[in-house]
Image (cartoon, rainbow, N blue to C red):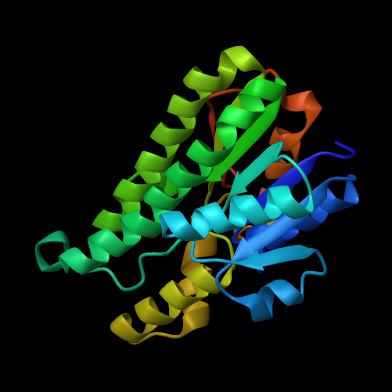
């Protein structure tokens, strides 16, 4: 892993931050990117603020990484928008659908498109996309999020087929409930809708897992770091669930 170059999106907090720090500890030169420069500054690594829901933002993140650190060997696509603001499909605002796809699916495609060719030319590369257990199972009032996370798994598998012959792997991780800022917002929305406390929402979420707890960001980050490593060369085109053995 030493001297590899990684671009980690959504790297200012949560899973992305933990993954970036793990990679850096292993000797990787890491660039973190997200929209908030304030959050990125606290990570302690190279960073570039960019809107990864636009082609221009993705191009900026890739170009700055390559200019400052070198060609990208590891791409961790971890940014995304959640489903707290969604409604039943017949009530869903089409703008919500388009915004979710812009961030959760269009951005990952652009980032892959801009980086995979170089990886193939050099004969090595790792792509890891953070999907969700919602990438295989549907949630109520979450048509945009569910569809985007299903699509992200498809993108990871398509890249695996295109780039696999050149020594490049592409996989997705599917976390269950993780206590991140995004999940906290959805808990607050649900609590307000149902007239219960936020902690009650989290207790219910924990109850669906055999260990009766939700994941910590580091537990997902450790799987991401493994998939970025030389040791994971035989893992390609997989959707790996990280959900404590839960069925959701």
Q: Position of residue 108 (x, y in %)?
A: 47, 47
Residue 119 shown left or right of residue 202 in the figure: right
Residue 189, x across and y down, in percent: 37, 80
Which sits in the foreground, 71 or 210?
71
Residue at the extreme left of the image, as rendered: 90
Residue at 35% over, 57% down: 102
Answer left or right for 6 relative to 108. Answer: right
Name the image quarter holding residue 15: bottom right
* 132 is higher (above) or lower (below) than 3: below
Name the residue rendered at 29%, 82% in the picture: 193
Question: Residue at position x 74%, y 76% from top?
Answer: 41
| Residue located at (65% from left, 22% from top) | 121
Residue 90 visible in the snapshot? yes
Quadrant including the N terminus: top right
Is 195 in front, or is 71? 71
Q: Position of residue 5 (x, y in %)?
A: 77, 43
Closer-to-camera residue (126/16):
126
Quick check: 162 above or below 25?
Answer: above
- Position above or below: 102 against 92: above
Front residue of 163/210: it is 163
In x, y percent, where is residue 221? 70, 50
- The correct choice, above or below, for 181 with respect to 238 in the image is below
Q: Which residue is farthest front? A: 67
Looking at the image, residue 80 sits to the left or right of residue 142; the answer is: right
Q: Looking at the image, how many numbered discs can be counted on the residues?
A: 0
Q: Is residue 141 visible?
A: no
């Amino acid at each position: 892993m030493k001297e590899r170059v990684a671009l980690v999106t959504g790297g200012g907090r949560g899973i992305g931050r933990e993954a970036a720090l793990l990679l850096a500890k292993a000797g990787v030169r890491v660039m973190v990117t997200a929209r908030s420069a304030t959050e990125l500054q606290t990570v302690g690594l190279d960073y570039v603020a960019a809107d990864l829901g636009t082609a221009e933002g993705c191009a900026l993140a890739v170009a700055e990484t390559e200019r400052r650190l070198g060609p990208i060997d590891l791409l961790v696509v971890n940014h995304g928008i959640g489903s707290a603001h969604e409604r039943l499909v017949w009530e869903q605002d089409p703008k919500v659908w388009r915004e979710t796809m812009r961030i959760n699916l269009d951005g990952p495609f652009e980032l892959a498109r801009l980086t995979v060719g170089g990886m193939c030319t050099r004969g090595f590369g790792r792509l890891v996309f953070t999907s969700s257990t919602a990438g295989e199972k549907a949630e109520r009032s979450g048509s945009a999020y569910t569809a985007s996370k299903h699509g992200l798994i498809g993108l990871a598998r398509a890249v695996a087929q295109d780039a696999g012959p050149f020594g490049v792997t592409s996989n997705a991780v599917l976390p269950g409930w993780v206590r991140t800022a995004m999940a906290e917002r959805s808990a607050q929305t649900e609590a307000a809708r149902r007239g219960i406390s936020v902690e009650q929402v989290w207790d219910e979420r924990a109850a669906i897992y055999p260990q009766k707890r939700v994941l910590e960001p580091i537990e997902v980050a450790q799987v991401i770091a493994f998939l970025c490593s030389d040791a994971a060369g035989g893992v390609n085109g997989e959707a790996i669930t990280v959900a404590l053995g839960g069925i959701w």
